């Protein structure tokens, strides 16, 4: 496939963050790691010129190609595959569950940095969104994102370079994340200024963390990373929590008063939330 020639003929729109993947080996890597078979329904976010779409169509039973750019849609309509259905709509307005008719659906996405967090929140649901229909309709998400963002999504409290944060917890609370492969900026046209990476997100079949009050946990996590340069104790007080309550919880859980949120595992955040909830 002469992807570069096809991409050069198209006028990419910077405002939409259009950088088309033209590396055939990277496209094959995506298809392989999504484990597409003839019974799968796949929803592709940001189908673009269809370079990934056409290979998905060769493997899957059904491909839903989500694209908002009318010029790109004209290119997608040229693909000779009857199992491709083009959806001209903003992904943030799409109910994924309506496309997972007989079984869970797989998501393939190459998304620009500026909309990564909103899309992930839409697909996975926030911490306190227990019965999110989108998440419960998805078996796998294979995501191409900016390299630095990929590290943040897959980070834990043991990660280096301050990668761990609220986005890490959002993506790992109901799911398991795996970093797969770094992709050079040269694999795209137009070539972006930064490298990208492919990650895999697998929504859990059962609840990973048992929490008494998920709204409270979400507030604690949000507060901890909103003031991440401060100790967790000071951050929570700035967030409106009682100093006395915090000190009681710290004493019971043997938490250092100097610890920051970035040093705490999700399990430890859950413990703090449950203990604070007992004091409300």
Image (cartoon, rainbow, N blue to C red):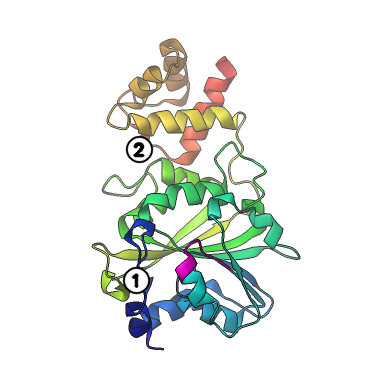
Q: State whether residue 212 is above or below residue 23.
A: above
Q: Nearer the viewer, residue 78 or 36?
A: 78
Q: State whether residue 162 is above or below residue 272.
A: below
Question: Magenta stretch?
Answer: 65-71
**Where's residue 128, x and y in %?**
59, 36
Which SS class for mark 2? helix
Q: State whether residue 170 is above or below residue 204.
A: above
- Image quarter where the C terminus lies is top right
**Where's residue 195, x and y in %?**
28, 65
Q: Residue furthest bottom?
A: 1
Q: Nearer the viewer, residue 109 or 246?
A: 109
Which residue is drawn at the image coordinates 61% and 83% (left, top)? 81
If you read the primary sequence from the N terminus, does the residue marked by circle 1 or circle 2 appear first? 1
Which SS class for mark 1? loop
Which residue is drawn at the image coordinates 42% and 52% (left, top)? 116
Residue 11's label in the rendered image is 1
The answer to whether residue 171 is visible is: no
**Where's residue 151, x and y in %?**
35, 55
Q: Nearer the viewer, residue 252 or 124?
A: 124
Circle 2 residues within 10 Å: few <14, some 14–19, many ≥20: some
Taking the magenta stretch, the answer to whether it contains residue 67 is yes
Q: Nearer the viewer, residue 104 or 208?
A: 104
Q: Residue furthest top?
A: 244
Residue 263's label in the rendered image is 2
Which residue is drawn at the image coordinates 36% and 54% (left, top)? 113
């Amino acid at each position: 496939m002469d992807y570069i020639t096809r991409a050069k003929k198209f006028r990419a729109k910077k405002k939409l963050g259009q950088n088309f993947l033209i590396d055939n080996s990277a496209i094959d890597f995506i298809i392989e790691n999504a484990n597409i078979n003839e019974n799968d329904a796949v929803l592709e976010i940001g189908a673009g010129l269809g370079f990934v779409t056409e290979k998905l169509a060769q493997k899957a039973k059904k491909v839903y190609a989500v694209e908002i750019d009318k010029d790109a849609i004209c290119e997608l309509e040229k693909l000779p595959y009857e199992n491709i259905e083009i959806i001209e709509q903003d992904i943030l307005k799409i109910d994924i569950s309506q496309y997972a008719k007989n079984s869970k659906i797989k998501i393939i996405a190459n998304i620009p940095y500026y909309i990564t967090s909103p899309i992930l929140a839409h697909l996975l649901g926030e911490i306190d969104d227990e019965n999110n229909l989108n998440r419960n309709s998805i078996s796998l998400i294979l995501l191409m994102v900016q390299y630095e963002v990929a590290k943040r999504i897959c980070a834990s409290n043991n990660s280096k370079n301050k990668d761990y944060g609220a986005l890490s917890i959002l993506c790992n609370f109901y799911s398991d994340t795996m970093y797969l492969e770094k992709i050079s900026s040269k694999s795209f046209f137009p070539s972006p200024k930064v490298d990208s990476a492919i990650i895999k997100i697998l929504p859990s079949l059962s609840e990973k963390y048992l929490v008494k009050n998920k709204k409270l946990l979400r507030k604690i996590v949000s507060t901890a990373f909103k003031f991440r340069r401060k100790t967790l104790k000071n951050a929570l007080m700035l967030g409106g929590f009682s100093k006395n309550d915090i000190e009681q919880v710290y004493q019971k859980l043997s938490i250092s008063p100097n610890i920051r949120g970035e040093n705490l595992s999700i399990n430890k955040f859950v413990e703090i939330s449950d203990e604070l909830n007992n004091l409300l």
